[in-house]
Amino acid sequence: MRRPVFIANWKMNHGPTEARAYMAAFTARWTPHEDRTVIFCPPAISIGVVMHALGSRRDIAVGVQNVWTEDAGAFTGETSARMAADAGARYALVGHSERRHVFGETVAETALKCAAAVRNGLTPILCVGELLAQREAGTTNEIVLNQLRAGLAEVGNESVAAAIIAYEPVWAIGTGKTATPADASTVHAHLRGALRERIGDRAAAVPIVYGGSVNGGNAESLLAARDVDGLLVGGACLDPANWATICGTRAAKG
Ligand code: 13P
């Protein structure tokens, strides 16, 4: 059994002051659940505040939204995986659709960022997803499998087995359009097949989460789908009460 994973991606929202208020509201209503993993990915500048708000709570983990490929040096404006780990992060989103399509991140950079995360003890959450035109052209599987294989090319099999994969169709992000549970399930099964080629039976334990216009109304049906092991949420995680509701989604298969 894979434990469901609920990942909040705040994107460029909630600076330190808002993050402090948010975490106070969330931690007051969210009690530890042993059957699921909750991860917050705040902007790097708010990680310290989030860590402080969590205090001794170990049931909620923190991730960084992006890392640079190097650990330190003359890279103005970037955050390294080493620094994110030092700030308390345990996870790193890598290859998020906005990094690829807004900031022009290449698959080669994505691979180096996964390697930087692993080198610094962070678990990569490798994001893959096709554009609408690619879906309409029938190339979804080819696109996401290429992103998966290339993204993991610079890390060893142990790290692949310990990673989290996120399928986020680009056309579903922030648009209110969601993949159907069946469509998500189909892509997730292909992704797991590709993981199996790389790491054999250990692929069965790798969480593959879905993202793209997830909300309180569709979370349960998406999570019920085969091979959908969790949710990566943007807009609907920005309110602490909404997010606590989504984190509490019944996670039963079938
Ligand atoms: P939305 O939930 O706002 O569609 O964003 C999804 C996403 O990109 C999470 O990483």
Image (cartoon, helix red, strand yellow):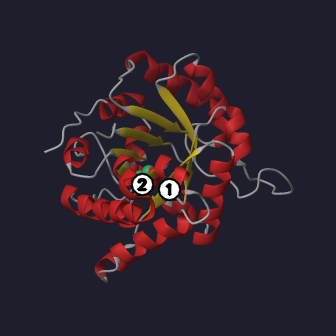
Residues at marks 2 and 1 touching, judged by CB atoms closer than 8 Å: yes
Q: Where 94 sits versus 230, above or below?
A: below
Give the labeled residue for mark 2. Answer: 166
Quarter of the N terminus within the rendering = top left
Q: Residue at x 23, y 36 (%)?
A: 251
For mark 2, give the secondary structure: strand
Instruction: Locate residue 196, reporting x and y percent.
Output: 37, 61
Residue 100 in which image quadrant: bottom right
The residues bearing labels 2 and 1 have C-alpha atoms spaced at a distance of 6 Å
Residue occupying the far front of the picture: 200
Q: What residue type is labelled 2?
A: Ala
Viewer can see residue 206: yes
| Residue at the bottom extreme of this rendering | 137
Q: Position of residue 86 (x, y in %)?
A: 72, 35
The label number, if any, that marks residue 126 in the structure image: 1
- For this view, does 16 lie left or right of residue 182? right
Between discs 2 and 1, the one toward the N terminus: 1
State which quarter of the image contains the C terminus.
top left
Tell me, for residue 38, which label it has, or none: none
Q: In x, y percent, where is residue 148?
A: 47, 65
> Residue 130's x, y, as percent?
40, 70
Q: Residue at x 34, y 59 (%)?
A: 192
Residue drawn at point x = 27 percent, y = 39 percent: 216
